[in-house]
Amino acid sequence: MCIKHFWKDLKEIPKTWSIKRQMMVCYIFAVFSMLILVFLFMITSFYFLGEHTVIKIEKTQSKQATDNMKELVAQGASYVNTKFQDIFVMNQLVKEMLYSMLNDENAYALNYLNITDYEHLPKENLTKVINLYGNQRVCFTYSCYKTFGEIFNVSYSLIKKVSRFNNIWPTTLVLTFQTVIRYMMYFDEGNFMITYPGSYIPSTYRPTNQTWYMAYKQNNATNLATVGYPDYLGNLLDIISLVTPLTDNNNKNIGVILADLPVLFIYQDLKELKYLGKGDTALVHKSGQILKCNGKGWWSNSYDSITQLEDSHFWGKVLVKPKGIHFMVFHDEVYRVATFPIGSQNNDEWWYVLMLFVKERDIMTYGSDSRNKIEEFGGILIGFFIFCGGVILAVIIMIIHCSARSIRSPLQKIADFTNKINSHAVESEFLGNLDINSLKEGNDEISELVANYKSLANVLLKYQDNRIHNPFKITTERVYPPNELFNKSKFNLKSLIEQLPDSKDM
């Protein structure tokens, strides 16, 4: 009941309003409702369009990121692999030369050079390079040898033959500058080791206990790359070794030639390998060991193997698919990881996998940027719409005001003129002076109403004038004095019309 009365009272309120107010309220409500609907439509359309656009951008960005990361890591792996293959070419060259010299000492026109152990190297040729070789002085002019085991087991004839390599060692090291810091040859049957540059080898050093030798024994028929290990002949830098087996005339393995590479050099070559300035790189051995450079890599000192990461399935997926894109969770962050194997030239046998890690939120930040830009543009558009809507509403209010005034003004003049007639009905002098032409006509319906009212008013005024000058021609009833005609001073139109004579009296 309360609601019913409320609506009833609400409906009665407009009836007390003027025409101007009613028109103003109706038009403003209609225009405001229309603007609200258009605004809601714009907001809804803009929202769905923005979401669709952002999704499209994110999909495009994701695909582009995948393709770019694949290309980047492939280029990085190709660069490292090229370096490795250059070193293996050098190793293979020495291997072929040794094989030829074992068959024919005159195969190469290389002089036999004096080769000694480290203690007998010329002192003036010893140089200290701390950042590579620590505090030990090395000789870049000659190589030196180190014998192991009993002296009578050492093949001095073989030492003499390999002394001829002193002619090529300096050039070989120059060709692999900023990649290799040391070349070594170890002969199982000869029981000695050659190092270039000539370096001090501690008495406790045993080649057969070294990482490179154990890897060679496990894969003695092919080229191989080792896991990372400290350089015990230098300043304990993390290094890897590229190992090539040496064979004799009967194709029997007699030892190895190897090149030592600081992991730091490799990472320096890969420091620019980033996706849009983001991400980190890592070299991981096939065994899962992470190659580190004194804890400066992305992995720091926290992990030695990638299998120690919290995402236990990640490495298994990489082993199955070493070339591709994988996702990994690390410290509550999702990483997109591009991987590419590094190995033999046809990549059917690989030793390391190069990984490029990029946080997923860094990749998709462009989607967020696009969303922010769309929202910013949407805010500007909405603000412009509100401004235009306000201007339109103001213009409409002005138009309604003028229209209402064009309706209200003539009606107000009619009301005012009527009040004048009623208030001075008995004042013949005043009635005679009323200017009926002050009610202006026009061409619309309101003007037509004014014209009809003027005609009626003219008739009444003329009739009143006649009634005042010929009072006895109108009725046979007793004529009252003018001040008693209607017992009141107002001019009553209805009573006046009732006193009009019939046609037969005229």
Image (cartoon, grey):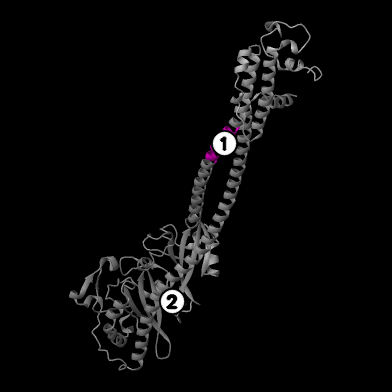
Residue 189 in the image: x percent, y percent?
A: 37, 84
- Under mark 2, the amino acid is Leu
Q: Judge whether 500 appears above or below 283 on screen.
A: above
The quadrant of the rendering that contains the C terminus is top right
Circle number at residue 399: 1
Indicate which disc, 1 or 2, sits on the residue closer to the N terminus.
2
Left or right relative to 37: residue 155: left
Q: Can residue 140 be seen in this view?
A: yes
The residues colored magenta run: 389-403
Circle number at residue 201: none
Closer-to-camera residue (388/337) = 388
Residue 278 in the image: x percent, y percent?
A: 43, 59
Circle number at residue 224: 2
Which residue corresponds to the image point at 55% horizontal and 35% vertical from the top-left?
398
Q: Judge whether 77 appears above or below 279 on screen.
A: below
Overall secondary structure of the magenta stretch? helix
Which residue corresponds to the image point at 66% horizontal and 34% vertical from the top-left?
445
